[in-house]
Amino acid sequence: MFTRRHAIRLGLTTGAVGAVGAAGGVFRTLTTGQRAGQPATAPVAASAAETASAAGTASAAGAVEPFSVPLTVPPVLAPYLRTRRADYYRITTRRAAAEILPGTRTDVLTYNGSFTGPTIHARTGRTTVIQQVNELDMPTSVHLHGGNNPVEHDGGMMDTIAPGRRRTYVYENKQPAATLWTHDHAHHMESEHVYRGLSGLYLLREAVEDRLGLPSGKYDIPLVLRDADFDENAAMVYTMDDAENRTTILVNGRPWPYLRVEGRKYRFRLVNSCNLRIFVLALSDGTATQHPVQQIGSDGGLLTAPAETPVLVLSPGERIDFVVDFSKYAPGTRLSLANMLGPGPTELVGQVMRFEVGRPTADRSRVPDTLAALPAPSSLPKPAVERSFDLTMDEPGTGGHQAYINGRTFDPDRVDTHVEWGTSEVWTVTNKSATIPHNFHTHLVQFRILERDGQPPYPAEAGLKDTVLLFPGQTAKLHLTFDSHRGVYPYHCHMIDHSAMGMMAQMKIS
Ligand code: C2O
Ligand code: CU
Ligand code: CU
């Protein structure tokens, strides 16, 4: 259960905690006019003035009536070849024009012309082979976020595909079922490339998960969240480290959509594909009633047991799988997925999408009490080494625009951390920024959170994780085991404007 104490440890302000309690029309977004994804130290109710100024900034998104656009689900890519052991795909990275805001066209960067990119369905133990063709006039690199892959298939920052060239990535899928994410990782370009659309889903399934009987097929729906800043011509505006103006919320590439659901259980897979925005989400019927959901999975796969929670907290790169049982609601009920964290006016960033509940339908799906077998933190392998990582960034007003891990900005020619293959380590990661949230993402490994600010992690983040959110001043103690691939892999803040500003480093496993 997500408690008030958990919320406080997560750095939610009292206002947000109150909003969690209220979980409805009275919630307050934290504030506007702040720097880069910064939560306010004090909640500010959206005022009429704020609303007016939001409407005053000419944006084609201003014409969008929230919950007027149906949710679409990204297309599932069909393999061009299936063998006994592998599925073969071809994806072209190219420019396209997409209808994001109704009746307008926006120039975007895409995988196969699709915004959000197409979804790949993969199975644990079966190999996925993807030939990526780069038809852009810029280098690209395709990273499978959350994937456990050899370094030559990891899509590193420097390991790019030149314009006009192609490259084949092979994923052996030797890891549990999970919601994974592919995105661009070309050094110094990843932030803008991902923002402009180089982002797609990779859903890894396996037989043990199938047998659980969770909602599946058309009742298993991905929700890829992001924000964007549109100008009056519906062009996407990219300004580095500009969280405040990215106030149009998109789900699967559509603004504030609605989804008609049957009165039964659904599984939703949330991916935060934003560059900077952190979401604190709750189901809301517009009153103060709480509508807890069951979180069943996090970044690296299923939790050991479902965790009932009134809020879902998701920073860039993080994933949350959760189940909602709409049979509890009368047909005609409207439930919105509300967001309680800024920056941005509540009218815009305070809502994500809406569910419109229909008639009850037959439902044989279930959410078992035991989902996955994971070792208890106390029985994880003893660490060979303990290390500390401090995240800092030039503070607002200093004129600096760099970001650091342990005082250093990223240097692709430097190995920052030497890890002995086959060992486990404990990493203590601290956000030393005074006002700016960060998170911490490792390539290659799924880690376990042993402690958050000296206390056990809350149940929703006690499973396999590859990205951990750290509000200013927060510390997380992570347990990592390096027993798969060798090589040089990055770790970085996944607020990718920050990693592009230098908050990234490299570990060599040998
Ligand atoms: Cu989403 Cu370096 O990763
Ligand atoms: Cu990654
Ligand atoms: Cu950061």
Image (tube, rainbow, N blue to C red):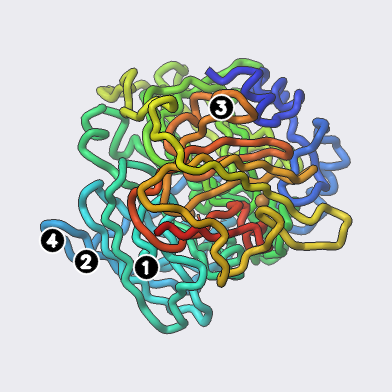
User: Looking at the picture, which amino acid does disc 2 mark?
Assistant: Tyr
Residue topped by disc 4 = 83
What element does badge 2 sit on?
loop
Q: Is residue 75 left or right of residue 383?
A: left
- What residue does disc 1 label? 152
Please report the residue visible at 28 percent of the width from the left and 25 percent of the height from the top. 365
Image quadrant holding the C terminus, namely bottom left
Identify the residue at the far left of this view.
84
Residue at 52% over, 20% down: 292
* Figure label count: 4
Residue 285 location (% of width, % of height):
59, 23
Mark in the foreground, 1 or 4: 1
Marks 3/4: CA distance? 43 Å
User: For numbered disc 4, what is the local secondary structure?
Assistant: loop
Circle 2 residue: 80
Q: Position of residue 184 (x, y in %)?
A: 49, 64
**Is residue 63 at least partly visible in the picture?**
no
User: Tag 1: residue type?
Assistant: Glu
3D distance between C-alphas at marks 4 and 2: 10 Å
Secondary element at tag 1: helix
Sequence-earlier tag: 3 or 1? 1
Up the image or down, 50 lies above or below 80; here it is: above
Residue at the image point whose x is 58% and y is 50% from the top: 226
User: Which percent across, then down, holds residue 124?
Assistant: 25, 46
In the depicted structure, whether residue 31 falls above or below residue 113: above
Question: What residue type is disc 3 on?
Answer: Leu
Q: Residues within 10 Å of mark 4 (few under 14, many from 20)?
A: few
